[in-house]
Image (cartoon, coloured by chain):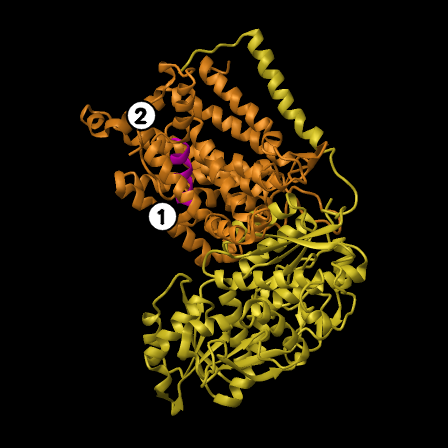
Chain colours: A yellow, B orange
Amino acid sequence: MSKSTLTRRGVLKSGAVAGAGLALPTYLAAGSHAGYTNAPTGSTVTLGFNVPQTGPYADEGADELRAFQLAVEHLNGGGDGGMMNTFSSKTLDGTGILGKKVEFVTGDTQTKSDAARASARSMIEKDGAVMISGGSSSGVAVAVQALCQEAGVIFMAGLTHSNDTTGKDKKANGFRHFFNSYMSGAALAPILANNYGTDRKAYHLTADYNWGYTTEEAVRTSTEAMGWETVAAVKTPLTQTDFSSYIAPVLQSGADVLVLNHYGGNMVNSLTNAVQFGLRDKLVNNKNFEIVVPLYSRLMAKGAGANVKGIYGSTNWHWSLQDEGSKAFVRSFGEKYGFPPSQAAHTCYVQTLLYADACNRAGTFNPCGVAEALEGFEFDGMGNGKTLYRAEDHQCFKDVLVVRGKENPTSEFDLLEIVEVTPVDQVTYDASIFGGELGSCNPGA
Amino acid sequence: MFGLEKKDWNLLLFVAALVALAPFILNPFPENSAMAQFNAGYPDLMQRFVIFGIFAIGFNILFGLTGYLSFGHAAFLGVGSYAAIWMMKLLTMNVIPAIILSVIVAGIFSVLVGYVTLRRSGIYFSILTLAFAQMSYSLAYSVLTPITGGETGLQPKVSDPRILDGAIADGTIPKANLFGLEMGASFDLSIAGWVFTFNAGYYIAAIVMLASFYLAIRIFRSPFGLMMRAVKSNQQRMNYTGLNTKPYTLAAFVISGMYAGLAGGLMVAMDTQAGPERMFWTASGEVVLMTILGGAGTLIGPVLGAGVIKYMENILSKINSDILHGWFAFMPDGMEDFTVAILYPFIGKGWHLTLGILFMLVVIFLPGGLVEGGQRIRALFGRGKAEDKPSTEPAE
């Protein structure tokens, strides 16, 4: 190696450099300001819309972004006002939020927790966003929610269906309007029992990650309570595209119902494989073989094409609903973009309006004030009937739709028909069953 | 000083000045101007610059010196992250034990992986490392969910044990700190429209990065570094002369794995969350891009490459079509739409496309990476001296 070159001058120089380096952080710690993170000072307020623009859920992300843009337009007084006219709270009048014009920044989550957090942090630290919304995967939602809790801004979750988001990973600064796995199970089970009987044998194929686990558990528990028997539950890798090797053993197992706990591309492929194998034409235990998909979306139904005909599932919202709120939203979305919105678009639009309304009612953008205004808030006219934002876990409670693939679709958007609107009482559960703790709100700064 | 030659000492001082003044250098535009979109001087991105700089410096010790192209380096980053987050959950939110453990765990893991994969070289080595990384990713994503949190990943919770920390005040959440100094603490300096943010976490990461950079210089200039260059130029010949190269390549592999673990630990320290995606093969590919883009085998190249890629990922990807329309609003309507339509595929979600084009241009015209570009510019202005030119052979 090299010989030591310890000189008096050298030691002094190094010492000075090291000293300066160590002293710097102490100086930095002094900086902090009162109030809350990113308090808007000018005539505008910035919201951050963090959606997947690339990756497997890019379709959902693009639809979410359309909904956000529409919501901002309506908040600023543009367009026909959409759901602002049917919303039961009347504080939104087209003058922005608290008189400030709404501006927004967008980012790409890539459906990866790291990328989503980086994008959300840049919105908070660089663009001064007071609220982050969007996302279309529970992993991302949980990661960004934790970040918002730490940074002291509000997180309005987009498309996230896992129990964990408002269950074991719930946070005081995070709010979810979308329904969850438990509600899907509770809404589906009675319909399945009515249509398929109570002595069925179910076989589960489950996507091998958190959302798959919670959905499988929810459907299992609620169908077993109806008298069904679970023959087997097999986990499939998330990256699987050909499910034939998983479908073949289903017939030998003696099961007569196949439950596909899959979402997005996974569900499109597994359902297509199952139908191609002729499962639905089989008679097992003297009963018709049936397939169930717990979480449906219009975009998925489109991908699976004719295979979805007659298959039951649950969904948060569907554009064919005939209440005033849904009609108003579908009309303004359709006028702007030329096709009906998906359930992801609906939940993102509603979340933005709910946030804006909560700020107006609280009279501040302070996350603690906004959270207080949202907790226990009851509203109507947003497409799902009477809805409650429960204070204990920041989860919305509302009716859940059970849908079925339409036999004779009239257009490429008209793929699902509503079988039943499960009333909210039937899907309500005790807030403590999933564990986790809400903590208390963090205004940051 | 510090056992460095004058030239290397100047390089170290140059890098130190760059990172110390980064809040100024990266925020060249006033806060409210239209160009503020291109400012990169906010804590998250500055932290990422130096952390991925460390990752790339470590990767370069393996790839730049020995020529072994590892395609699974993100696995060590991920393992380091999980080690660090568990340390924070179980022991203390202080970042020091977390970072130390992340380096140790990544080191042990890289000994295991290196022992197996280094039995082969060339493309077979790359494929073996890739396989190991994908295995780690799949394990973390599903099978090991109780330890890794699966898709959701891990975050510190109020209910974690944290043996060494006292109970946190009611209503607060555990935050990563260095003896009480929070990583998120920042100081804003406003000068006539410009806002410069000095962030504690950034400067701590920057000091670690300078230390790693210094260590890399020492390794490059040591007899050990010379031995690794010999491995790169002709390993067979060394074997025929009766020299066993395996210990040297394994040492290089473990050192670079520990650098990756250090980067992973720092990532958790700055942003307390660990998830499996950071082990995905694209993350491993990214560090290869960084190193080649900057200049494989050069000292400062990987740091530059990391900076360029992270800048594009975070700044370019956030420009949406509304912002573009804002920029070209002065043009007549038809022309505005046309310009936006031409540019749009290259920004926003299309930033990968721009990165790909840049990468191709660099590899074709500047095989030595951005460092070679810098040298050519210097030579153009007549200040580059012949002996200054390090070798610019492309890595195999």
Disc ID at residue B229? 2
Residue A242 x/y as whole percent: 34, 67
> At x 40% / y 89%, what residue is drawn?
A288
Locate residue B165 relative to residue B240 in the image: left or right.
Answer: right
Mark 2–mark 1 Cα distance, whole angstroms, equals 26 Å
Which residue extends farthest bottom? A286
In the rendered view, would you say A71 is above or below A399?
above
Q: Is residue A309 left or right of residue B179?
A: left
**Residue at the left extreme of this rendering:** B240
The reply to whether residue A88 is visible in this rendering is: yes
Name the front one of labels 2 and 1. Answer: 2
Residue A21 locus on image (x, y percent):
62, 24
The C terminus of chain A sits in image quarter:
top right
Q: Quadrant of residue A23?
A: top right
Quadrant for the N terminus of chain A in the image: top left
Count neighbours of disc 2 (C-alpha within 10 A) and say few if under 14, some if 14 to 19, many if 20 or more.
some
* Prevailing secondary structure of the magenta residues: helix
Q: Residue at x 45, y 60 (%)?
A: A56
Whichever of callouts 2 and 1 sits on the residue coming sooner in the sequence is 1
Q: Does residue A8 appear to the left or right of B372 in the view shown?
A: right
Closest to the observer: A155 or B237?
A155
* Quarter of the view holding residue A356: bottom right
Q: Quadrant of residue A141?
A: bottom right
> What number is the disc on residue B132?
1
Give the residues drawn in magenta, as a range: B283-295
Question: What is the residue that sits farthest to the front in this orientation?
Answer: B332
Residue B139: say if magenta: no
